[in-house]
Image (cartoon, grey):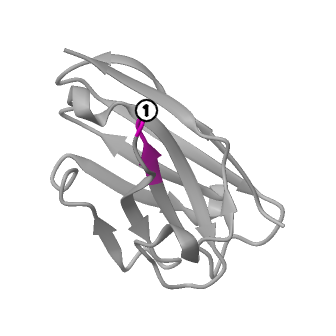
């Protein structure tokens, strides 16, 4: 079992920054790939970013490339999402997810555990 707890969401003006954190517990964090997804009201959940267990493989959605940065700290069992130059269209509930294999993935159905989500609201 893996428990994931997100934090760091909030209200920010357009152009601002937020850093989301996802703390994992319940098993060793190694050999576990992580991802961030988001879901806006009335829309389906969408991929944001993913990182392999080693951190050597990272991938982003085109909509956030160049603005968001995913990273992880194996010692702290935590994955981060640094979000810069935020836009109103980034408003959503952000979820972190864990995949019980080392390789990263863009596909939500390939993740085994999910956090409860944290709200990010970007005002114009």
Q: Nearer the viewer, residue 56 or 58?
A: 58
> How many residues crowd around disc 1 within 10 Å: few (fewer than 14), some, or many (20 or more)?
few
Q: What stretch is highlighted in magenta?
A: 37-42
Name the quarter where the N terminus is drawn: bottom right
Dot 1: what SS?
loop
**Residue behind mark 1:** 41
Point out the residue furthest to the front here. 42
Closer to the camera in the image, 79 or 107: 107
Where 25 sits versus 102, above or below?
above
Task: Report the residue at 31% width, 40% height from top.
Answer: 83
Residue 8 shows in this picture: no
Give the percent coordinates (x, y) of residue 54: 49, 79
Question: In what quadrant of the picture does the C terminus appear?
Answer: top left
Q: Position of residue 67 (x, y in %)?
A: 19, 46
The residue that appears at 20% across and 21% down in the rendered structure is: 14
Q: Quadrant of residue 56?
A: bottom left
Q: In which quarter of the image is residue 112?
A: bottom right
* Res. 89 in view: yes
122 within the magenta span = no
């Amino acid at each position: 079992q893996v428990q994931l707890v997100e934090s760091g969401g909030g209200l920010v003006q357009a152009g601002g920054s937020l850093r989301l954190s996802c703390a994992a517990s319940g098993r060793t964090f190694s050999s576990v790939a992580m991802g961030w997804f988001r879901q806006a009201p009335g829309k389906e959940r969408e991929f944001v970013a993913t990182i392999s267990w080693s951190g050597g493989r990272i991938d982003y959605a085109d909509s956030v490339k160049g603005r968001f940065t995913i990273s992880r700290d194996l010692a702290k069992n935590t994955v981060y999402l640094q979000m810069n130059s935020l836009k109103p269209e980034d408003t959503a509930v952000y979820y972190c997810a864990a995949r019980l294999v080392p390789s990263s993935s863009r596909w939500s159905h390939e993740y085994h555990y999910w956090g409860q989500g944290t709200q990010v609201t970007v005002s114009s």
